[in-house]
Image (spheres, helix red, strand yellow):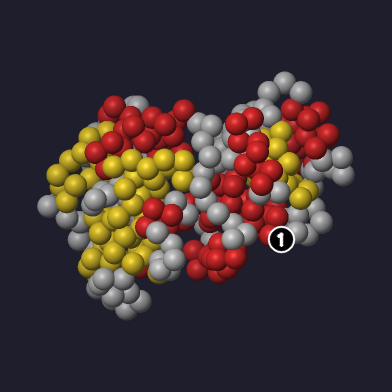
Amino acid sequence: MSLAIRYARYGGPDVLTLDEVPIPEPGPGEVRVAVRAAGVNGIDWKLRRGFLDRGQLAGGPAGTGVEFAGIVDALGAGVRDWSVGQAVFGHATSGAVATHATTASESLLAKPDWLSFEQAASLPVAAETAYRCLRQLGVKEGQTLLVHAVAGGVGLVAAQLARAWGAEVVGTASPVHHAFLRELGVRPVTYGDGLSERVRAAAPEGVDAVLDGSGRDVLAMSVELTGDAERVVTIADGRAAEYGVRFSTGADRVPLSEVFAEIFPLMEWGALRMPIERTFPLERTADAYRLSEEGHLRGKIVIVVA
C-alpha cells in the first residue's frame, strides 16, 4: 500500500486527508517514482478549492501536487529511458504529494548529484513557467522586465534568468524581501497605491515587458507601462482577455530538457538559486498549503516524504 494526500470535496486545507491507497501502477510509457519531496504550487490549492474545476472529483477522491523528486520505482511497458533506482525529478501525472506517484516518461529529468531532492522538487513548475513566459515575451539583453510577485518561485526564476540574459529587472514585492532581491540584482518596488509611479522611478528607461505572477489587478497598469498588450503575460489573472493580454498556461509547456539545459549551468555557476521558504512532513501537508495560501513567500514550500 501507499500513502497519499487527497481530497473528496472542494474546500480549504482542512479537506485534505492522508489516505492509505493501493500503490499506483505505471501505464504504458509511464514511470512510477518513490517520492522523496514534492513542491507546493498555487495551482494545487486553486484546483482543490474548485476554482479551476476540471472534474477531478468525478471519479472519487483526487490527489494533489504536480511536481516531485524521488527514485524510479517501476517502469511501464515501452519505457527505455529510465532504470529502477535512478534519482529523478519532474512533473507528476498522479498526485505528487504521496509516497508513490506516476508520470509520463518524458516528464522526468535525471536529478544531478549536487541537487538535493528538496531543491529538485521545488524547480519544475517555477523553472518551466518562468522560461516559457520569458520566451513568449521575447526578453533579451538591454531590455527592462517588470515582474509582479517577484519573490515567489516563478518570479525569482524569471528575474534571475532575465538578468543572466542581460536584461534589467524591476519587481514588485513586500518590503521584507527587498534586501534579498537587491542581492539578486533586482530593483524592488512595493505593492499598493502609487505603484505605477514607483515603477517608473525604478525604471526611468521604461519597461519593455511585464510578467504578472500576482493577479493583483495590475494588467491595465502593465499595458500602459509597456504601451503594448502583447508585451504583457500573466499566469495569475483570469481577466487577461479583457486587456488583450496573454494568459500563459501549462498547455504551452516547454520540455523540461530544454528548460534545464538553460537552468542547470546557471545554478552550477551560482547565477540562479531557488530559496526554500519552509519544508513540511507529509502528515502536515495541510499546514503547508495554509502557508502557501497566505502568500508573501520567498521561493517555494516543499513537502518532504519520509
Percent x, y of residue 118: 39, 53
- Which residue is farthest top? 193
Residue at 76% across / 23% down in the picture? 194
Secondary structure beneath disc 1?
Answer: loop
Residue at 46% across / 28% down in the picture? 294
Looking at the rendered structure, the kind of residue marked 1 is Trp
Percent x, y of residue 301: 42, 42
Instruction: Report whether residue 43 is seen.
Output: no
Label 1 sits on residue = 165
Residue at 56% across / 37% down in the picture? 236
Badge 1, how many Cα within 10 Å: few under 14, some, many 20+? some
Percent x, y of residue 269: 60, 65
Residue at 65% across / 42% down in the picture? 181
The vertical placement of 185 against 213, above or below, is below
Picture quadrant of residue 136: bottom right
Judged left or right of residue 183, residue 224 is right
The vertical placement of 249 against 224, above or below, is below
Picture quadrant of residue 262: bottom right
